[in-house]
Every structure is written in C-alpha cells, then in structure tokens.
Amino acid sequence: MSDPVSSIRNLGPAMDVACAKAGIHDAETLRTLGADEAYRRLLRSGMRPHFIGYYVLVMGLQGRPWNDCKGDEKKALRARFDALKADAFDSGLSAFEQALNEIGVIDRAKP
C-alpha cells in the first residue's frame, strides 16, 4: 500500500484531499512530480494560490521544517511561485482581474 501525501513532513490531511483532487494520490507520486509540477496541478484543479502553502510543500519534499525557508532562498521560491501562479492560475486574466484576484475578489475555483 502506498503512503499518503500526508506522510510527507509538513503536509496534513487537507493536502491529502487537495492532492487527490489534482490526481496526486500518494506520497511517491508527489515526490516524483516535484513541488513545482505538483503545485501547478493543484492550482489547475481549483486550489487557491498561497505562497506559504507552496513553500511548505517545497520544504516538506526536502525533509525540512516548513519555517526553514528564509532570505535569498525564500525570495527565489517567491519568484518560482509567482511564475507558477501566472501560468496555472492567472492565465487568461486581464491585468485588472489579476489585481482583483490578488486581493481575493475573483473566485477562480474551477469545476
């Protein structure tokens, strides 16, 4: 039997549910995909983007505590997160809609 996604450090039952919705059903699949592709799939499945959630996933896959990300590493992760979000969540939105989305006005949950 495969280990659940929540067997990975920092990830809990809510991530099991979110990953299953995105077609990621176990820890091995998540590790194989890596943080960026897994997060892209999570966003495309309707999960709302959240930078902390992204870097918690990255740190977990590295076996590190979620709050271990600091300084230049955190800045680099922010750039990766912004690129993923633009590609998988914000694509097709006007600049105005993207600004509204940043403050949580647009509901981008996909069916």
Image (spheres, helix red, strand yellow):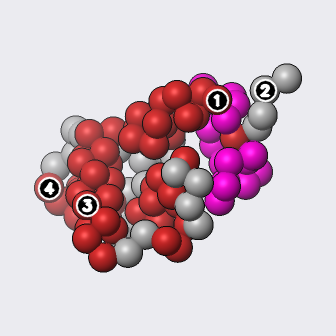
- In this view, the residue in front, 33 or 103, is 33
Which badge, 1 or 4, is on the more N-terminal residue?
1
Q: Amino acid at mark 1?
A: Glu
Tell me where residue 101 sits by quadrant: bottom left
The label nearer to you, 4 versus 2, is: 2
Q: For marks 4 and 3, give the CA distance.
A: 23 Å
Labelled pair 4, 2 in contact (Cβ < 8 Å): no
- The residue that label 4 is drawn on is 95
Q: State the extent of the magenta-drawn residues as a range.
A: 6-27
Labelled pair 4, 3 in contact (Cβ < 8 Å): no
Determine the residue positioned at 85% across, 23% down: 1
Q: Residue furthest front?
A: 63
- The residue that label 1 is drawn on is 28
Which badge, 1 or 3, is on the more N-terminal residue?
1
Query: Above or below — where is 22 with respect to 13?
Result: above
Tell me where residue 65 sits by quadrant: bottom right
Determine the residue positioned at 41% across, 63% down: 51
- The residue that label 3 is drawn on is 76
The label nearer to you, 4 versus 3, is: 3
Labelled pair 3, 2 in contact (Cβ < 8 Å): no
Q: Amino acid at mark 3?
A: Ala
Q: Amino acid at mark 4?
A: Ala
Task: Residue 102 in the image: state x and y as whole percent.
Answer: 31, 65
Residue 20 is left or right of residue 47, and the answer is right
> Which mark, by number, is residue 1?
none
* Labels in figure, total: 4
- In this view, the residue in front, 94 or 48, is 48
Labelled pair 2, 1 in contact (Cβ < 8 Å): yes
Report helix, strand or loop for mark 2. loop
| Crowd around label 3: few <14 · some 14–19 · many ≥20 (10 Å) | few
Q: Quadrant of the C terminus?
A: top right
Asked whether residue 111 appears in the rendered view, the answer is: no
